[in-house]
Image (tube, grey):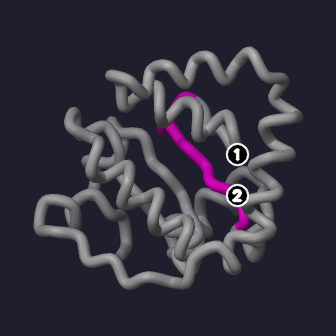
């Protein structure tokens, strides 16, 4: 599958209900088809992590990767995703007013408690959305 190279790839914890909720949220708002998704547990996700010297068995961080350019983590990834969705979500640029370390502290708080916040949900993407997943 080569069509991912011109997209933004969202890496997420495939076993986390909160993470799956946000993947679904992004899918429903991705009107310009900018994003694709891969779980961190997948072979593709594991390759992404290991090629960058990142932890391959801890899945509490969301990554946004623009192949050949950059990757962002935690709050920077969230803010960039919102900005790329456009419309009202472009207001996420206001999040840059808050120091990154404070935003990441909030991200880490949610991440630590994510399994308590939402049970694992079995999300079933439609046919178009299935094409946006790398190694489902």
Is 94 positioned to the left or the right of 38 in the image?
right
The residue under label 2 is: 61
User: Is residue 26 inside the magenta stretch?
Assistant: no
- The percent coordinates of residue 126 (x first, y second) are 15, 68
Please give the label number shown on residue 74: 1
* Residue at the (75%, 76%) spot, across then down: 57
Q: Quadrant of residue 1?
A: bottom left
- The percent coordinates of residue 29 (x first, y second) are 29, 43
* Residue at the (11%, 68%) spot, across then down: 127
Disc 2 element: loop
**Towards the viewer: 31 or 98:** 98
Q: Quadrant of residue 94?
A: top right
Q: Main secondary structure of the magenta part?
A: loop
* Residue at the (47%, 33%) spot, across then down: 82
**Towards the viewer: 60 or 106:** 106
Is 12 positioned to the left or the right of 116 in the image?
left
Please give the label number shown on residue 82: none
Which of the marked residues, 1 or 2, is nearer the chain's N terminus? 2
Q: Identify the magenta region.
A: 60-69
Disc 1 to disc 2: CB gap under 8 Å: yes
Q: Is residue 87 above or below residue 40?
A: above
* Residue at the (54%, 30%) spot, across then down: 80
**Towards the viewer: 79 or 65:** 79
Q: Quadrant of residue 45?
A: bottom right
User: Is residue 61 inside the magenta stretch?
Assistant: yes
Q: Is residue 58 above or below residue 109?
A: below
- The percent coordinates of residue 52 (x first, y second) are 72, 51
Quadrant showing the C terminus: bottom left
């Amino acid at each position: 599958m080569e069509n991912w190279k011109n997209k933004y790839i969202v890496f997420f914890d495939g076993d986390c209900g909160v993470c799956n909720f946000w993947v679904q949220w992004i899918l429903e708002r991705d009107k310009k088809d900018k994003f694709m998704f891969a779980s961190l547990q997948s072979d593709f996700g594991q390759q992404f992590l290991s090629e960058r010297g990142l932890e391959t068995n801890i899945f509490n961080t969301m990554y946004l990767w623009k192949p050949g350019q950059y990757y962002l983590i935690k709050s920077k990834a969230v803010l960039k995703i919102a900005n790329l969705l456009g419309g009202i979500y472009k207001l996420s640029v206001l999040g840059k007013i808050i120091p990154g370390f404070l935003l990441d502290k909030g991200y880490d708080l949610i991440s630590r408690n994510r399994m308590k916040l939402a049970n694992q949900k079995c999300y079933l993407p439609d046919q178009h959305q299935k094409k946006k997943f790398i190694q489902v």
